[in-house]
Image: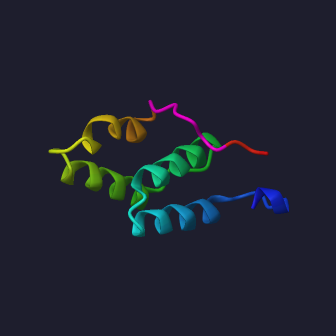
Amino acid sequence: MRKSDVVPDVVHYTAMIKGLVADGWILKAMDFYCEMKSREFPADPELEKLFKDFLSNSKKNHWSRGAKEYITGKHERNRITSA
């Protein structure tokens, strides 16, 4: 989108995040969600619930340890930046 001078809005982010989640790309979806929130778009309760449910359903594996930072806003890993 950025290569075509399209500035993503909340609808673009939400569609991308839901698509990534549907295909099992949870961490990438969380990256996009963090990017969306860092651009001061409002938090989406449906996506928040989806990520929290994912974390609570996977407490016995590695997902629940590091991924909680995404929900709490502490995650500062490589985010996609504007070109």
Q: Quadrant of the C terminus?
A: top right
- Please determine whether, in this image, residue 67 is positioned above or below residue 25: above
Residue 27 % position (x, y): 42, 49
Residue sitting at x 38%, y 63%: 24
Residue 72 % position (x, y): 39, 36
Q: Is residue 38 left or right of residue 33?
A: right
Q: Is residue 66 left or right of residue 5?
A: left
Q: Front-most of 27 and 35?
A: 27
Residue 2 % position (x, y): 78, 56
Of all residues shown, which one is farthest toward the right? 5
Residue sitting at x 33%, y 35%: 66
Which residues, given as a range, are shown in magenta?
Answer: 74-80
Residue sitting at x 28%, y 54%: 54
Q: Front-most of 32 and 73?
A: 32
Exactly how many numbered labels are in the figure? 0
Quadrant housing residue 12 = bottom right
Residue sitting at x 62%, y 65%: 11
Residue 55 % position (x, y): 27, 48
